[in-house]
Image: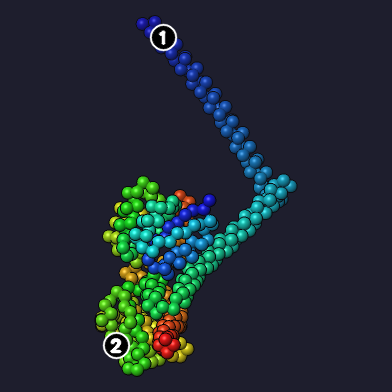
Amino acid sequence: MTKDINELFTKGKDFLDIYSKVAEFSKELMEENRKLQGRINELIARREAMLASGGDEQESGLMRRLEELKKEKQEILNHYRQVEEENKDFLHRYMEIETENNNLANLYVASYQLHSTLDLKEVLEIITEIIINLIGAHAFGILMLNEKRAVLEPVKAEGIPIEALPTVRIGEGIIGKVAKDGETYYRDPADKPLPTDYSHPLVCLPLKIKEETIGVIVVYKLLAQKAKLVKVDYDLFNLLAAHAATAIFSAKLYGDSVRKQATIKGFLDLLTH
Amino acid sequence: MGHRVLIVEDSPTMRQLVAFALRAIPDLQITEAVDGLDGLKKAQAGNFDLAIVDINMPLMDGLKLIGILRQDPKNQRIPIVIISTEGGVETKRRAEALGVNAYITKPILSGLVYKTVKALLEGEEAGGGEK
């Protein structure tokens, strides 16, 4: 029994020692905390005083530098935006020049080919090639003026049988009116479709030498992948209106002169032999 | 040494336009064939780096010509560009099955032809073409 009391007493003493140590440690912590709080207050007061007096020399230098860098950054950003705009402008101009180059290439080749022969059949073939390959038409025809009958007669057709093309009186319907007035007729393929007969073309182009119309080109349908006519197509139609007409006219004159020359030669041969 | 290109096209206008479009590629040697059969003869006789082929041509159409070229050990790997009025999906699928590298539908833009051919000659994918 005495032994148990002694053990209990010893444990109580140990507990008292630990408690004393904890109390002492807590006291130390409280003291340390108080000191740190004092230090923080001191630093806050110092900072506020510095800010109120404009900071020391080094800090104001750094602030100035910071402002300069901010300004520089803004200038660089402005310059970057300006260059970006210029790039967009250059890209736009590049695309315009490329389109112009494409158009000029087409016009150059069309013009070159139209005047590359004096054979009427070949000239008509070249006109056909230009309309298919450079404009992208699927169904079209060429009608030439028969002056004696005052009608336009089909001489060439592509994508449609030539027999299907009408013979048109000057001044009659869209085609006849184009031949009479010499003004090109265009209809937007996206517009409300007109009756599907050959008197309602998509495009009707007069072939003119000065003010005289010698024939017309009638386009009825574009290639499936060609949704509408674009600027170069109108340029090509304008080129065809003038150059195709002169090419056909020259080829006809040349053909006539060759025939007449052959006749005269035959006649002379008859006289001299 | 420059590249050699074979243009197989029955239309003189198109041959001139394609040749005109490619004029900016340095040292390019162009050989023209007026139909499929002429194209086959020239392809077998020559040594070309690229062929531009139309589809609708007299004597032999372009797809048949390409089929024969793809069986020919000499020409089976050359890049082929089709330039045609045929814009249908089925024709394009047939061309793709024959190993055509680019397909351009008419009416053509000379800039597109130039970019497509240049890219293929430089061993790149035909970024400019429709395929």
| Residue at 42%, 69% in the rendered image | B13
Q: Nearer the viewer, residue B115 or A105?
A: A105
Q: Nearer the viewer, residue A21 or B12?
A: B12
Q: Nearer the viewer, residue B35 or B106?
A: B35
Residue A244 occupies quadrant: bottom left
Mark before the other along the chain sequence, 2 or 1:
1
What percent of the width, then of the height, locates residue A97? Answer: 52, 68
Q: What is the chain letter for disc 1?
A: A
Q: What is the chain letter for disc 2?
A: A
Q: Disc 2 on helix, strand or loop? A: loop
Classed neighbour count for the residue bearing mark 1: other residues with Cα under 10 Å, few (<14), some (14–19), many (≥20): few
Q: Is residue A70 visible?
A: yes
In the displayed structure image, the side of residue A187 where residue A63 appears, left or right: right
Label 1 sits on residue = A7
| Residue at 38%, 72% in the rendered image | A129
Q: Amino acid at mark 2?
A: Thr
What percent of the width, then of the height, locates residue A68? Answer: 67, 54
Label 2 sits on residue = A167
